[in-house]
Each structure stands twice: as structure tokens, then as C-alpha cells.
Amino acid sequence: MNTNFIGMNYTLLKEVVQLLEEFEVSETSKNHSQDLEGFKGWIADSFIQDEKKYPEPEWENKANGRTPESAISTMLVHMSRYAKMYSKSAISDSSFSTQEDFIYLINLNALGAMSKIELIKKNIQDKPTGMQIIGRLIKQGWVVQSKSDNDKRSKLISITEKGREALDAQMGKIRHATSIVSGNLNYMEKMELIRILNKLEDFHNPIFNSNISVPELLDEVNNNYLQIQN
């Protein structure tokens, strides 16, 4: 038995089978022989067509060897900071301290009461930071906590009428700030960006919810998540 088969990447095998299925039904495959050489030629032609449709973009320091992964990471950080800048403007004349305050209220208003941990995880934050935000909201009278019927040790957080009023008073500006973040993208570009960001969310969220310790995080992700992705 070939021992290399044991360590086969079954995700790659699945992708190859899917490509073969596309080759069988594709109109463009009729221009190629129905054998291995024809299959390779069809893949090459498809790649060329994709390059024409989606030419590789430029990014800062690309010519000096900067990787696309580095550029993506930096641009995502920048986008987060731009969004925070507009959010600060939207709440500048209100009692909100940070954008997280109104995001917590928006989630509670839309999704209903939830535990403190659920609310914090919903907003992708660590527990100490989340508890500080919830404390501010309680102090403002915008949320209240009550005992959970399912778990007596857990406290449920729900939005109050005062919280809804505070949220409603700023929603016009908040929506305006939100609309600015997507900038000059047209509708189709927005849909494509949502599709890509959803894929990233589906990858990162299970990792976040696994509560992996910081020292082990990179190795754990590299060993147990990256290699199984499509």
C-alpha cells in the first residue's frame, strides 16, 4: 500500500472530483478531448478566463514581496478603524460612550434577552471588556438583568424602554454612519463582499467560540482548522 495515501488531503480530492463533474457538463469542455490532457487544457483555459474577468489587483508593497494575506489583514484592520471613526461621529452628541454600547443595544433589541456571555460572544469580545460595557448599560438604565429560568446561575440581559428610546434617538445617525462604511461599492460589489466576509466569519467564529488559550492559538488553528478548509 502507498503510505502517502493515508495522509491524503480529502478536501483536495473532493475539489478535484467537483472539477471533473464540471468538466463533464461544461459547454467549454467540448473544445477539449475527454481525457486527462483535455481536462488539464480545460482547467488552463478556465484559469485564463478567470484572470481576464478578475485581474490580480495591486496592493501596497506588492512589488517588494508583500503577501496578499498581509495586505488583507491590514486592510481589514483599517476598515474596522474607519467604521469606528464614523460611529464616533454618530454618537458624538449622545450619552453613548462607545460604538459597542449601541451595538449591544441593537442586538438585544433585535434578538431579545440573552445571557451576559451570549451577548459578549455575539459581539466577539473578551469577557472583561464585555462586562464593562454591560455595566455601563445597566448604570445608564438601558438594560436590566434578571434570573434565567433555565440556569439559575446565569443572568439574562434585556433592553429597557429607556434603552430603546436612547437607541431610537441615534438610529438615524447610526444608519447614516453604517451606509458610509460601504463607501462607493455598487450593489453587486456589496453582495460579493458579503459573500466573502460570510466565508471568513464561518471560518473564524468557531475558533473564537472554542476559547483556545492565547499561547496555543496559532498552532491550534494551523493544525486543526486551516488544513480542513475548502
Image (tube, grey):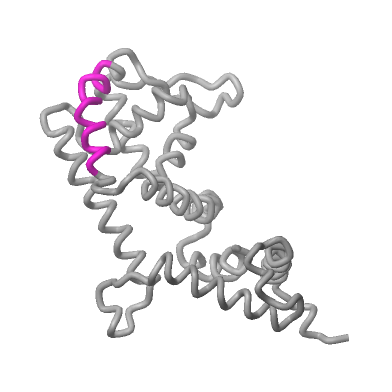
Residue 95 in view in this figure = yes
Q: Is residue 10 above or below residue 138?
A: below
Is 31 situated left or right of 112 in this image? Answer: right
| Residue 136 point in image, percent of width and height | 27, 30
| Residue lying at 29% horizontally and 19% vertically, measured from the top left | 163
Residue 171 covered by magenta stretch: yes
Q: Quadrant of the rendered structure where residue 109 is? A: top left
- Please name the predominant secondary structure of the magenta segment in the image: helix
**Which quadrant: the N terminus?**
bottom right
Q: Nearer the viewer, residue 163 or 200?
A: 200
Residue 10 visible (yes or no): no
- Residue displayed at 31% across by 36% down: 133
For the residue pair 116 and 224, the one nearer the viewer reads as 224
Quadrant where the image shows the C terminus: bottom right
In depth, the one of 40 and 116 nearer the eye is 40
Q: Residue furthest front?
A: 31
Q: Is residue 210 above or below residue 51?
A: above
Q: Which stretch did the figure color magenta?
A: 165-180
Residue 46 percent location from the top left of the image: 56, 71
Residue 5, relative to residue 59: is it above or below? Answer: below
Q: How many marks?
A: 0
